[in-house]
Amino acid sequence: METKKILLDTDIGSDIDDAVCLAYLLQRPACELVGITTVTGEPVTRAKLASCLCRAAGKGDIPIYPGCAEPMLGNSIQPKAPQGAVLASYDHQTEFPLHRHIQFMIDTIRANPGEISLLAIGPMTNVGLLFAADPEIPSLLKDLTLMCGVFGNAQPRTGPREWNAYGDPYATAIVYNARVPVHRSIGLDATVQVKLPVEEVRRRFEGGLLKVVMDMAEVWFRSRDYIIFHDPLAAATLFNDRVCGFDRGQVEVELLSERAKGMTHWKKDEENGPHQAAFRVNREAFFEEYFSQFTPGKNEERSEDI
């Protein structure tokens, strides 16, 4: 089994799906997490939450860098990381390198040209600044996978804008204007198809790393009675071709209209489109892919194939 080098950019600490995603990556035998950067309000608290999961998984040596607290222009739409309420219950890193996240990303990608899969599951500020700071970086990636945007999927209806895209519209535009060998987006219209109610989450998130995630999820459940697996779906596409089907096209990001700023406009172009967007979701394949990583003994069996 081929090992993939993943650089994760996350806003863990707001929606619970980031923690659900990170737990999956930490458990996936074929995933080599080369680093984690955090983004939006209270990035240090978010880094501590990432550290909780890394240490609980026995991988406390993964580099973690707090990133940008504010978007390129304007104020953060999520200034707080409410899941930080669980930090007192878990061992975690307390000191982090500050204001070095972009250089860390540059150094990591340049040290591994053509090998890094950049997985961005928060607002695009860090990635936009990375591409602006070093314009060669997009071409040095193996691929870029985003949980970002809405692309007109005819499945469940959603609003016209997606949280990560309008969390920093200008950074989002930079990211979609970059030319990457493989530029994939899993949009809101795809991710809303993988949803579990609170009762089923509590039943299935038992023991090990999922117990830590469950404690974070209880903060989320104070205002919600479900989890949508937005970010885990994006992560799963890196390892399992069955969970999503993609079309090729062109994505343009709305910047002129204040009411629509951050909206992603999709134009299908199967021959020349530089972007791929998820238009088909295999719900059963996804949940099998996700929860199979937490089956006792599963990783020991798979590790022999790596």
Image: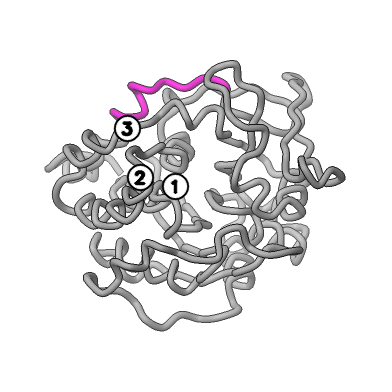
Label 2: few (<14), some (14–19) or many (≥20) C-alpha neighbours in 10 Å: many
Mark positioned earlier in the residue sequence (2 or 3): 2
Where is residue 301 drawn, in percent x and y? 17, 40
Specify the amino acid type for callout 2: Ala
Callout 3 secondary element? strand
Mark positioned earlier in the residue sequence (1 or 2): 1
* Residue at left offset 64%, top offset 37%: 149
Residue 179 appears in the rendering: no
C-alpha gap between disc 1 and disc 3:
28 Å
Residue at the far top in the pictured view: 154
* Residue at left offset 42%, top offset 23%: 242
What residue would you read off at disc 1? 4
Circle 1/circle 2 CB separation < 8 Å:
yes
- 185 lies above or below 126: above
Q: In which quarter of the image is residue 295?
A: top left
Residue 4 appears in the rendering: yes
Callout 2 secondary element? loop
Q: In which quarter of the image is residue 241?
A: top left
C-alpha gap between disc 1 and disc 2:
6 Å
| Highlighted range, magenta | 279-288
Where is residue 1 drawn, in percent x and y? 34, 38
C-alpha gap between disc 2 and disc 3:
26 Å
Callout 1 secondary element? strand
Q: Residue 42 carries which label?
A: none
* Residue at left offset 46%, top offset 39%: 230
What residue would you read off at disc 3? 196
Number of the front mark, 2 or 3: 3
Specify the amino acid type for callout 3: Leu
Question: What secondary structure do most residues of the magenta stretch adopt?
Answer: helix
Left/right placement of residue 77 relative to residue 208 reads: right
Q: Which of 98 and 138 is in front in this view?
A: 98
What residue would you read off at disc 2? 30
